[in-house]
Image (spheres, grey):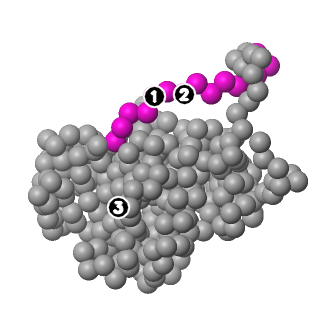
Amino acid sequence: MSILGLERVVYGVEDLALGRRFFEEWGLAVDGDRFKVADGTEVVLRAMDDLDLPPPVEPGSTVREIVWGVESRAALDRLAERVGRETRVSRGGDGSVRFFDPAGFGVALVEARRLPLPPVEIAVNTPERRARIDAAGAFYKRARPRRIGHIVLQVPDIPAMERFYRDALGFWLSDRYPERGVFLRGRAAADHHQLFLLKSADGRPHFHHLAFEVHDLHEVFGGGLAFAERGWETHIGPGRHVISSCYFWYFRSPCGGSVEYFADMDSLTEAWQPREMPQSPEWFAEWALASGVRQYGGVQR
């Protein structure tokens, strides 16, 4: 019963035109109200008053449905049965399974349709090994996200949410901030986290951010520089997380919460032993800039 990762994230937004411009400039391919990532996963924008959307957990523009891709139809049917023991579910004509998690977020399960990504060799020179000979390193004029990596939710009751996602949906525990946050992944062999549940400061649920994986550190920087030059506001970054080793750059989103470019996240298996660590600045980031960086002279190759 393996959840492969995020298949689709649906927003309800106040300003559709602004949201469309945001995700197009973020580097996604436009297909009507859908924005495709390289592996075929997608972001969908709908008007916030669309009656077909699940009800919001908070006012204003925000995520309205989180759709997870499951490895097969048989696995989807088994998960539907398990989830049905915990909460009410509905089945769509396409076999999709819809329900609400304990925090009130609309969730769906579908059979995964993502495309395989051919491997790309990123040549890096080190003192011990010269992998790039007679060739310049990569420079990126903008980012082109390869896949949706993870989503972060702020919730009032972390133990209830953790039990639901682990018991009903089969998520694996990666690491934990005791009483403050939990990092989960949909199967044993996966990114360090595909879902991060963070303790809500005001006792109410909130969408925090959606993260998109790019090729490497240079694309995090190049994409972030290009996006900032278009006038979008940095939330925090660039920087490097300690908890998952990845490089990041977060931007505030007019569709709710933030979005993140990231690269080089830890990849785990069943051999990984979950850690407990304090939620503190030194565990959040090895280093981070508070408000982005500016291109030198405004020139980018």
Give coordinates of residue 165: x percent, y percent.
31, 56
Q: Nearer the viewer, residue 88 or 254?
A: 254
Q: Quadrant of the C terminus?
A: top right
| Residue at mark 1 to residue at mark 3: CA–CA distance | 26 Å
Between tags 1 and 3, which lies in front?
1
Tell me if label 1 and label 3 are in contact, CB under 8 Å: no
Q: Nearer the viewer, residue 155 or 263?
A: 263
Judged left or right of residue 44, residue 112 is: left
Between tags 2 and 3, which lies in front?
2
| Residue at mark 2 to residue at mark 3: CA–CA distance | 29 Å
Residue of label 1: 118
The majority secondary structure of the magenta stretch comes to loop
* Label located before the other in sequence (2 or 3): 3
Q: Which mark is residue 136?
A: none
Give coordinates of residue 76: x percent, y percent.
18, 47
Judged left or right of residue 7, residue 191 is: right
Q: Secondary structure at mark 3?
A: strand
Structural crowding at the residue carrying mark 2, measured as other residues with C-alpha within 10 Å and reported as few (<14), some (14–19) or many (≥20)? few
Residue 257 versus residue 55 in the image, above or below: above
Tell me if label 2 and label 3 are in contact, CB under 8 Å: no
| In magenta segment, residue 93 | no
Q: Quadrant of residue 58?
A: bottom left
Seen as rendered, the residue at the extreme right is: 297
Q: Quadrant of the N terminus?
A: top left
Residue of label 3: 66
- The part of the chain drawn in magenta is 114-128
Residue of label 2: 120
Tell me if label 2 and label 1 are in contact, CB under 8 Å: yes
* Label located before the other in sequence (1 or 3): 3
| Residue at mark 2 to residue at mark 1: CA–CA distance | 6 Å
Amino acid at pointer 2: Val
In percent of the image, x 21 and y 63: which residue is there? 98
